[in-house]
Amino acid sequence: MWGQDDKKATFPRRRREDQHTHTSGGESGTDDKKDEIVPTLIHQVPNTNLLGAGEMSIVVISDTHGDHRKLDMPPTADLLIHAGDFTLYGKKEQVEDFNSWLGELPYRHKIVVNGNHECNAVWKGSVKKLLSNAIFLKNEFLELTDIGEGNNNTLRIYGMDFSWPCLGGNPAFEQIEMPMDILISHCPADGFVDNKMGCPALTQAIFRLKPRLVISGHIHNARGVATSQDGEITFINAATARGGHSFGQQPIIIQFVNADDSEQQCEENRATGRFMAVRQAFIDYFM
Ligand SMILES: [Zn+2]
């Protein structure tokens, strides 16, 4: 364990105003508004840094904890990413039903990583077989070349195994050298949609690797979108459970918009995204 002062001494925190600033705790946090479902959040990102030039939409979810069938999933998307904790304490019947549910979704690509609820499950050795309707990544790199409008985008994706926050370096992060567009880590990075409970070593790795998107969950009450100070990295906490493990938040949809758009349009898109994230933070916190 460490205090906030220790974390600050490691590297500067780069928090933006559109990050959630909930005061309640993470997975065990209390929530007075349990019955109100937080609606789907749509966030637009200019795709200037991607290899392709077309538009695409990515549905992002995490921490479904067995309640995947309660989600209001959009009818179409190019890619689904689940950032871990698809079960509650690794219940086998939940991973089996999760896989059936994945098979019913009409998206071309579905990617899943471990959360803390899966990494010690009795079936952990056969998770790829159990998740036959998705691509399961465990410290693995994946390149998709047929995604988005006109199938002309290439996405480089890295999915991490779960690890708890650590202050010093994490060998699992340090060995990653390939450039990537999307990094998936169940635990969020320190300083971004993490409710001050993210991983400092992960933040260091992210600013070295510079992915376009970082997709996490784990800290349920920090659900939302944040952006690095230079606007280059978008951090998403897509937890669909609220405080505790019960369902209460709908998916986050990331739309990559055309790089052909004028700079002004990109700025407008960024502003729209910021506005929506701030609005969502307001809804989460006050309503
Ligand atoms: Zn969780």
Image (tube, grey):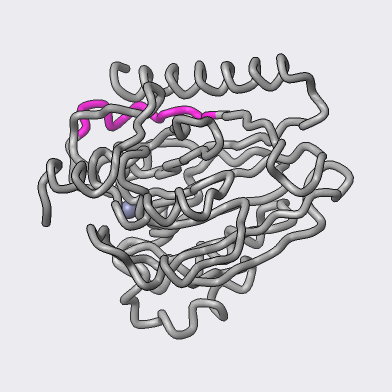
Residue in the picture at 34% in, 82% down: 122
Q: Position of residue 275 (x, y in %)?
A: 50, 16
* Number of numbered discs: 0
Quarter-of-image position of residue 157: bottom right
Whether residue 262 is in magenta: the answer is no
Point out the residue furthest to the bottom here: 125
Residue 57 position within the rendered picture, expressed as x and y whole percent measured from the top left: 69, 40
Residue sitting at x 40%, y 44%? 239
Above or below residue 274? Residue 68 is below
| Relative depth, front residue between 38 and 146 | 146
Q: Position of residue 62 (x, y in %)?
A: 44, 50
Determine the residue located farthest toward the right in the rendered image: 150
Quarter holding the C terminus is top left
Q: Is residue 186 left or right of residue 267?
A: left
Relative to 25, is 100 on the left or the right?
A: right
Residue at image position (79%, 45%) is 148
Part of the protein shown in magenta: 31-41
Question: Quadrant where the N terminus lies?
Answer: bottom left
Magenta: main secondary structure equals loop
Residue at image point 49% right, 47% down: 214
